[in-house]
Image (spheres, helix red, strand yellow):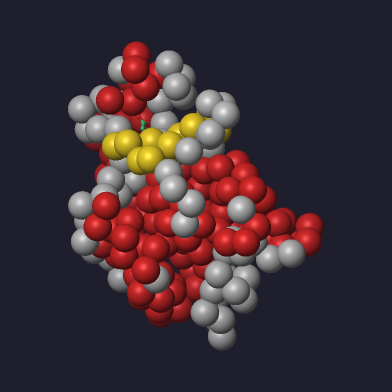
Amino acid sequence: MKLYYSPGACSIGIHVLLEEIGTPYEAEAVNLREGGQFQPAFTAINPKSKVPTLVRDDGSVLTEYPAIAVWLAGTFPEAKLLPQGADGLARALEFTDYAVATLHMQGFSRIFRPANFAPSEADHPAVKARGEEIFSKGLGVFDKALEGKDWLLGDFSFADSALFYLSFWWGDRLKKPLPANVAKHYERMKARPSVQRVLKAEGLA
Ligand SMILES: N[C@@H](CCC(=O)N[C@@H](CS)C(=O)NCC(=O)O)C(=O)O
């Protein structure tokens, strides 16, 4: 398998899952700042120009964070990235989709790329403020879900690595306070050897 990632991007959550699984894989950085995602060498693999992108051992390409997480959990059940049964899958996806589709795409994207939401620079402060509102509300939902629990679904699952990348962005990149349960979850994630290896590998340790 080969993961295309960018240091500190959402792909870090998938990078963590690969380390949790422990099977050999390659990882190649795509320089998003320099537009590497738009270069023909990368668009030939993923025409969506996005990371994470996973090339599997049979050469087929899998994109979209939740799809990659589901496939990894189902293909490597011994890594226990998912509670058993349909309900476990539904709950893990419920959290992961909320992380990716709402907090990331609707919240963080507004903060990080306001021009994608409003062409006029004069509107950017309002767009960013709305992004912070969406992200912050979402963290509140995760905080409540973590009440009295170490992990979102009781045991560690792929939903936790999705929350990890959001906590990394909010707490470490934007230097904003995380709600109490999410902050403890973030510390728990950083204590996992898989996360420590990934932070080092992505040059973020
Ligand atoms: N819907 C995609 C979103 C992935 C995404 O937005 N990735 C960002 C990095 S966090 C990216 O590759 N951005 C490059 C770009 O938009 O040019 C997924 O779930 O994987």
Direction from residue 179 to residue 84 in the image, left or right? right
11 relative to 54, above or below? below
Q: Position of residue 22 (x, y in %)?
A: 47, 57
Relative height, residue 205 to residue 10 (above, below): below
Tell me if residue 63 comes above or below residue 202 in the rendering: above
On the rendered structure, is 17 left or right of 155?
Answer: left
Ligand 1 occupies quarter: top left
Instruction: State left or right for residue 161 relative to residue 112.
Output: right
Residue nearest the viewer, comparing 190 with 80: 80
Q: Nearer the viewer, residue 116 or 51?
A: 51
Q: Could you say where residue 201 lies in the image, as x and y percent from the top left?
A: 27, 52
Q: Which percent across, then down, holds residue 165?
A: 39, 56
Q: Position of residue 2 (x, y in %)?
A: 43, 37
Task: Count the marks.
Answer: 0
Query: Which residue is most to the bottom?
Result: 148
User: Does 128 appear above or below 133?
Assistant: above
Identify the residue at horizontal 60%, vertical 41% (top origin): 67
Q: Residue furthest front?
A: 24
Residue under the point 42% across and 31% down: 50
- Residue 157 in sight in this render: yes
Q: Residue at x 36, y 74 (%)?
A: 191
| Image side of residue 12 versus residue 101, left or right | left
Quarter of the image where the C terminus is located? bottom left
Residue located at (68% from left, 66% from top): 83
Can residue 66 be seen by looking at this rendering?
Answer: no
